[in-house]
Image (cartoon, rainbow, N blue to C red):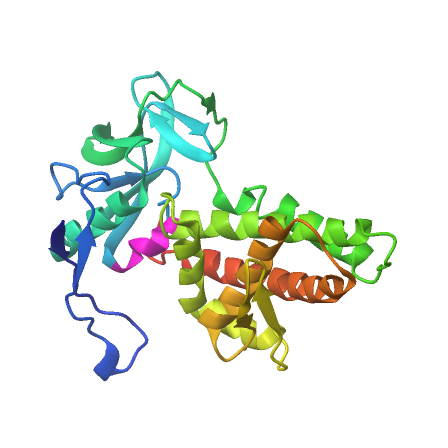
Amino acid sequence: MKLTPTCGHTRQNQTDSDTTMNCQTHEQNGNRLPHPKDLSLPFFAYGVFKPGELAFLQIKEFVSLCFEGTVDGQLKIRDGLPIAAIELPGRLDGVLIQFRTECQLAAYQRISDLEPEKQYRWGTADAGGQIVNLLVGISPDKGSHALEEAWDGRKDPLFTDALEVVEETLKQNRGEKSPTDLKPLFRLEMAYLLLWSSIERYASLRYHLRDKATEKVLRIASEPAFVAALRKFAPSDKRSVQRADDPKKKSILDPEKPLEAMKYYYQVRSNLVHRGKGALGDHDRLAKSLGELLSIFRYTLKAAFDDSKFEGEH
């Protein structure tokens, strides 16, 4: 295990006492993607790290300059992730990202920490006379297909069609409950699990693409947009839910405690997965949780994409 210093940086629009971030250290797992050999080269982003994409939030603080460029190769998609096939003929559009000199190590470590080493390796390419580092797909022809247009995370089906299906299902089934007909409840359960698929997709693209889904999801609770949305859409009365596998333990929905609130919504999900059956009391709790969490997630998702833009981009 290796400790690597992160870069101190200055943030705009803050008070003088809060403008300078101290250098910190964090652990680098030896099983993750290593750094590229030459950290001084610009990073060529063609997918999740482009300005305007969720993963750009991981490196935005280190960026000094962004400008559009192209390299030889083709853009493919595999398992929902864009990959570069630079050995194939074609043109791959992207963005050259220049990091501040004192932040190059920290920036490339953030990139390496997010990407799975089984999907990518580091490579170099020529972008109009400028040599760049880029993430190259491993065995890009296996399990992939060509992507005809630039990758756009905002158009991810789990952020568009899936959320519309969740909303439609909620509207059609939230008021229907009967001790003899549990179909409306089961439809709400399916919608709730689909919503969580969208949330987990968001957490993966924003934080890292490895396992540990619960850890990634709980990190969302620290986002200012989630905190604001929770206060806006969650009820002031504190609902609770017991664990299906241990009724002595419970989670409480409190809009003033974001982490506990996220655990509440996640516990509702876990109960659906592990219990496999429902009751009339579950219908009301599930309908309320589904409506609240859908609004909270849409608010958080929009704020994240808005924040991922870079003003110096051209």
Residue 42 in the magenta stretch? The answer is: no
Residue at the spot 49% in from the left edge and 67% down from the top edge: 226
Give coordinates of residue 263: x percent, y percent: 50, 65
Q: Nearer the viewer, residue 117 or 269?
A: 269
Snapshot quadrant of residue 34: top left
Residue at the spot 47% in from the left edge and 56% down from the top edge: 305
Q: Nearer the viewer, residue 74 or 159?
A: 159
Give coordinates of residue 150: x percent, y percent: 46, 35
Decide: is 309 above or below 289.
Answer: above
Q: Nearer the viewer, residue 92 or 269?
A: 269
Q: Nearer the viewer, residue 6 or 218?
A: 218
Left or right: 205 in relation to 251: left
Residue at the spot 35% in from the left edge and 16% down from the top edge: 89
Left or right: 255 in relation to 224: right
Identify the main secondary structure in magenta. helix
Decide: is 153 above or below 177.
Answer: above
Give coordinates of residue 242: x percent, y percent: 58, 67
Left or right: 176 in relation to 83: right
Q: Can residue 123 be seen? A: yes
Residue at the spot 41% in from the left edge and 33% down from the top edge: 82
Left or right: 67 in relation to 196: left
The residues colored magenta run: 53-61
Residue 59 in the magenta stretch? The answer is: yes
